Amino acid sequence: MSEIGMIVGLRCPHCGAALPETTKELVKCSYCGTTARVEDADKYLRHLQGFVINWVRTALPLGLGGASSSSIDPLARHSIFPQNVFPSLNSEFSKIQLEAFEAFSFPLVAPPFIGHTFGYNQQKDPKDLFSYDAKVSSVQPLAVTQDDQAVVQKFGGLSRAFAHVLIGLDLAQKSQVKPYKVIAENFAVAANSLQGQSEILSRRMMALSEIYLSIDEALSKQTSKSRTRIKSAKAVLEEVLSKSALDINLSICSSAIEQEIEVANTVLLINDLVERDPTGDQMDNVARVEKLFSATSTTCAASVSSWRHRFENFGRYSELTKWLYIVLGAKKGFNSIKIASGSGNTLFPFWVAEIEYTFSTGALWMRKGKYVKEAALVTATFPLYQNFAASPSEVVTDIFSRRPEGAFIGSITGSENAISTGENIKILVQRASLKSASGYKIIPPLSTVSEANQLMNDYLQQVSRELGGKLHIASCDMANILFVPADMTTGFINFQGSLGYVQPKKIGDVSILNSISV
Ligand SMILES: [Zn+2]
């Protein structure tokens, strides 16, 4: 029987994980990727052993620390675990469990090329978790009953799983070129560590490991492998999600799992894009996705807090990928998009909003209410303009900026029929037609339908405030994307007057728009 307080095997001095056996001077950690000198790993092991032995001395009754478990009277051994060992390990475990579940309530994978972090602010050092695990396994010989052994499994398993998740997240957040396979390995170990105690959580970790592998395959253009893997990982996550919702401990992970499913959707779409890679083109579609995602995630991370939570929703990246797919398809003649009439070499994306409002007009006894149906456009690249949240009117066709002709007299007599001037936009939308877009340069949308809706509502609220209650919004629907032809030259976009004086003042940095155009 092994000695109490003994730990064996080299440990990585950087992350604390177990190192492979070696006869060489240098050894590479398979979990954090650091190469360490065996000498340093050995030093760390001795430090850890000292740490564990010290703890055993304080946790065990006097004189038993360092003894071999077989030398302890079996009857005494039976009571040492529940009376001495368990209380000492348990108080620390409660803290670890709390921290682990806090981490697991964040999405543990992000779409590739995303600049910002996952939302989880990592402060825990995986080394501390491995040290705790070393304590737990060092007293394993004292766990004689089945219950005691289950405690050892549970305490050690969760702390090891949490440690590996932290190492994986650290690699995913810090490195420029993400070592997806190494990250996947950490999640696979986390899944194994949780087996037998939290089956649902274990399956989630395994699915995440598979997602990391499938991202690696998608980016290296092994699409059929990637697709098979991501489809089954997504199915597992969907099952895990439905079971988590019913579990009191795991229900806090539900929204994180939904986000992870969105990542799976994005990877599926990236596979579709990669398979449609144009031959003979200078830039492949993986590079296009990278440009699009990094451009939008960088500016979104810098936006105001009321918008940031929207932008941190990973569902937006599957929506943006879908649009990129549609736009590329239109360019190749596979499908059509809605194009407005007008001249120019570049197609610029706008969301079409259908607005219904009522307003009151007429003075005193001539006062009455009128109902108007209008159309307005939202610049689909608005997240690129830093100040959009504070001044939404700059990124939409500002149809309330001028009153229709004769408005002054009309507002007294009550004969005015509208307080907006969206007539041009309505005609532009009505005359647009579905067609393929070969020969055009196309800018893919950088916002989602719900983001555009929010922006338009912010704008309408602002107008309503400015008009002091004259305007009441009945509804605002975001219909579709309309591509408006424009001429794009260095630093400038010219819509050739097709949007009239309501043309949005800001559309985003033209050099970024140029770099993401297809
Ligand atoms: Zn390591």
Image: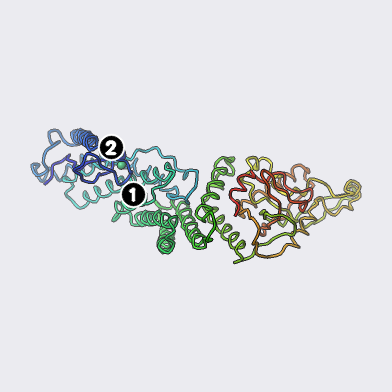
**Residue, far front:** 280
| Image quadrant in which the C terminus is located | bottom right
Q: Is mark 2 within 8 Å of ligand 1?
A: yes
Query: SS class of the residue under badge 2?
Result: loop
Q: Position of residue 71 (x, y in %)?
A: 8, 42
Determine whether label 2 and label 1 are within 8 Å by CB.
no
In the depicted structure, whether residue 63 falls above or below residue 359 = above
Image quadrant in which you'd find residue 305: top right
The amino acid type found where label 2 is placed reads: Pro
Residue at 28%, 56% in the rendered image: 196
Q: Position of residue 259 (x, y in %)?
A: 48, 53
Image quadrant in which you'd find residue 87: top left
In the depicted structure, whether residue 22 falls above or below residue 273 = above
State left or right for residue 366 relative to residue 472.
right
**Residue, far bottom:** 334
User: Residue 451 or 270: which is nearer the viewer?
Assistant: 270
Looking at the rendering, the quadrant in which ligand 1 lies is: top left
How is the model colour-coded? Answer: rainbow
Reading the image, the residue beneath label 2 is: 13
Query: SS class of the residue under badge 1?
Result: helix
User: Residue 418 or 40: which is nearer the viewer?
Assistant: 40
Q: Give the tally of numbered discs.
A: 2
In the depicted structure, whether residue 84 falls above or below residue 366 = above
In the depicted structure, whether residue 470 falls above or below residue 222 = above
Reading the image, the residue beneath label 1 is: 186
The amino acid type found where label 1 is placed reads: Asn
State left or right for residue 70 relative to residue 292.
left
Residue at 64%, 51% in the rendered image: 380
Of labels 2 and 1, earlier in sequence is 2
